[in-house]
Amino acid sequence: MDSWERARWVLGSVGLSPDRLTECRPLSGGTYNTVEELRLSDGTRYVLKIPPPRSAAGLTHEVELLTAEAVFCRAAASVGVPTPEVVSAGQHHLLMTHCPGAPWSEAVPAEQAALRSELGSLVARLHTVTGPGFGYPSGALGPLAPDWRTAFTTMYDAVLDDARRYRSWLPRPVDEVARIAKSAYDALEDVRVPRLVHFDLWPGNILVDHSEQAPRIGGLIDGERMFWGDPLADFVSLALLDDIRQDRDFLTGYQEAGGRAEFDAPARRRLALYRSYLDLIMLVETVPREVSDERVARVRESVAPELLAALDELAQYPGRGTGR
């Protein structure tokens, strides 16, 4: 069925009259799922996500991502974090309410400090939510694990296997990356409680609402990459290709809301592992996404140095870090 017919069917399946649909338009920014905005005759707006066909090429963990997004939205809402409300989560779609606001990039410099502080407090709230085990809730890599080391090493091995399968370009050989990462896996044992991690909180997934006098965070969206794990992992995308330790406004808001942000040696080892994991994903996914040569060049230019820096940092911290 075409987009319009599909949107009408989804609306009808949740008890909304398909005849109220007045607009169905694609939303940009997504790289995996099809995302559309639905407008009804009374002005109500929804967001509809449709996964690619199961035969589509992708990374191993990219299975049932919409299941994870539904988990994220419901969990975030439980602690008062603005996020889309799940209207319907079916096998082949996810229908959500539309969050107010525009992408973070439209915020002016004078607004940044207050917004980063508010964002810090919201992320701290996210990290109070605990899960039933460690790992991706979709089951793409198997059932949730009883410990973080088992879960994260499975995640890391999966993306390395993807790199081998797709013969992806990396700035160092895959086996060398695996060896360096493995030397730091003991630091993962310090994480005892599985907590909600969005893992994709770059500015494009943070909406800023200007409808009132003071701007505020209108919503944290696109939670399809979430997992249950170490909250420190969220600091990677929150300072994408940068260092979260330099973001004093965010960290102040995070800590004042009860978040724990300490960067001792074991924490820095884990943070370097998570940075390298996201860097690997960004480099490897260019192959199954079939992105343009120009885009590939830009990704390599910006991400490869970050991956090398993370690997070099891991190599500087040999041995067992003290737990907590």
Image (cartoon, grey):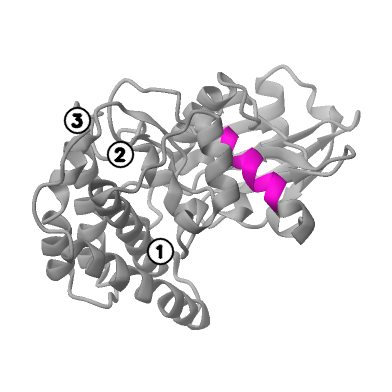
> Which residue corresponds to the image point at 39% horizontal and 22% vertical from the top-left?
130
The 10 Å Cα crowd at callout 2, few under 14, some 14 to 19, many 20 or more, is: some
* Lower position in the chain sequence, tag 2 or tag 3: 2
The 10 Å Cα crowd at callout 1, few under 14, some 14 to 19, many 20 or more, is: some
Where does the image place residue 102, in percent across and percent down from the top left? 76, 49
Name the residue carrying label 1: 282
The 10 Å Cα crowd at callout 3, few under 14, some 14 to 19, many 20 or more, is: some
- At numbered mark 3, what does the secondary structure look like: helix, strand or loop? loop
- At numbered mark 2, what does the secondary structure look like: helix, strand or loop? loop
The boundaries of the magenta stretch are 113-122
The answer for how far apart the CA atoms under marks 1 and 3 are is 26 Å
Residue 4 visible in rendering: no
Name the residue carrying label 2: 140
- At numbered mark 1, what does the secondary structure look like: helix, strand or loop? helix
Of helix, strand and loop, which mostly describes the magenta segment? Answer: helix
Tell me which amino acid carries mark 1: Met
Tell me which amino acid carries mark 3: Asp
Which mark is nearer the camera, 2 or 1? 1
* Lower position in the chain sequence, tag 1 or tag 3: 3
Q: Is residue 306 magenta?
A: no
Name the residue carrying label 3: 147
